[in-house]
Amino acid sequence: MKIQEIAIGTIRIPLVTPFRTALRTVDSINDLIVKITADDGSVGFGEAPPTAVITGDTKESIEAAIRGYLAPAVVGLDLSDLDEIMRRMEKAIAKNTSAKAAMDIALYDLYAKMLGKPLYRVLAKDAEERSNDACTQSASCTGAELETDITISVDETEKMVSDSLRAVADGFGILKVKVGKGGEKDVERVRAIRQAVGPDVILRVDANQGWTKEEAIATIRAMEDAGLGIELVEQPVSYHDFHGLQSVTKAVDTPILADESVFSYEDAQRIIEEHAADLINIKLMKTGGIHQALRICDLADKYQVKCMVGCMLESKVSVSAGVHLAAARSCITMADLDGPSLCAEDPYEGGPVYRGPKIFLNEESGIGITRMPVEFACVARAK
Ligand code: MG
């Protein structure tokens, strides 16, 4: 099966409430969609959000990278040699991980469809995992089942408490609390949330680089001393402060999860080998897609490091690629895949089913998305 045509379009979906972190505020998803058509007519879909404050990728840069570099590099190639396709994309342009991820996801979707299998079975590490994996976990669906956390945006304490209570009432048992706006105030935010939701809800804290090294150590220790029962703290310091991250990890008991500090396989390798964090957050928009994410999973397996699969503000196409990855690989023990839960509507059909905190995979081929209400413009066609 050959890559016949590559096209791009845009999807816009309003959010239920504005998404606020230490870095930005956003009120709708406005993502680029890639559609890749094979010479037998089957199609694969990918998605990329413009997350300029984290990846450096804007809508314009994602489009330009695909149109000018990535699509021309792979159009006409045989899909059966995915490694070669990925190598050509890597060589075509440096960085631009969101554009690469959108292409990579569409290619994996199409590749799994070519094999007639759901993507998570294609990504599983060995034959045993492929036949067993999580398929028997749930009686209510034919495939695997995951539980995602949900993000509580950083805000005034009162608002964060009411958002947390609503999430718990909606069935979420794991909250990812955004902090990083004033260390002492952050302790109060988390304390108030813990008091409101009780001891059984799992609390993850994400500072999104908002603290200095000293502030991070003092704040996390204060949360520990107050007995707030925090599962982990994500990205306490700036992404380029490797030694700061390492110092925080050494100084506190709470596990530290590296997010913005880990884009590539090489980033993950350095963090793990020099113990600069305890856990790794894999996001397809940072790795440049599934191909590189699988390499990080292999590394995590080797060192027995647990990973989270996270997402940016993405809708169901690319988040579902993350869902398939999480279901396929045992090093991934945590899912932060709440993008579709934050959307006010679901414009797609097919794919995993998102029901509150639960995500159910099924046996549809590829990622599973069938309806795609997007107008596409062709950017490359095989001769
Ligand atoms: Mg994060």
Image (tube, rainbow, N blue to C red):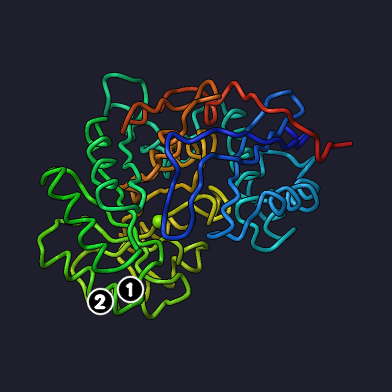
Mark linked to residue 172: none
Asked whether the residues under the numbered discs 2 and 1 touch, taking CB atoms below 8 Å apart as contact, a structural biologist would say yes
Q: Position of residue 33 (x, y in %)?
A: 65, 37
Q: Give the quadrant of ligand 1.
A: bottom left
Q: Which amino acid does label 1 sit on?
A: His
Image quarter for residue 139?
Answer: top left
Image point (55%, 60%), residue name: 53
Q: Position of residue 63 (x, y in %)?
A: 73, 47
Image point (44%, 46%), residue name: 19
Image point (35%, 30%), residue name: 144
Side of 250 relative to 38 (left or right): left
Mark linked to residue 250: 2
Classify 10 Å Cα crowding around label 2: few (below 14), some (14-19), many (20 and above): some
Side of 286 relative to 306 (left or right): right
Residue that mark 1 sits on: 275
Q: Which amino acid does label 2 sit on?
A: Lys
Quadrant of the drawing holding the C terminus: top right
In space, the residues marked 2 and 1 are separated at their CA atoms by: 8 Å
First in residue order: circle 2 vs circle 1: 2
Image quarter for residue 32?
Answer: top right
Q: Where is residue 152 in the image (x, y as percent from the top left)?
A: 33, 46
Residue 57 versus residue 146 in the image, above or below = below
The residue mark sitting in front, 2 or 1, is 2
Classify 10 Å Cα crowding around label 1: few (below 14), some (14-19), many (20 and above): some
Q: SS for tag 1? A: loop
Q: Nearer the viewer, residue 382 or 309?
A: 309
* Ligand 1 closer than 8 Å to label 2 CB: no
Q: SS for tag 2? A: helix
Quadrant of the drawing holding the N terminus: top right
Q: Nearer the viewer, residue 144 or 379?
A: 379
Q: Which of 248 and 165 is in front in this view?
A: 165
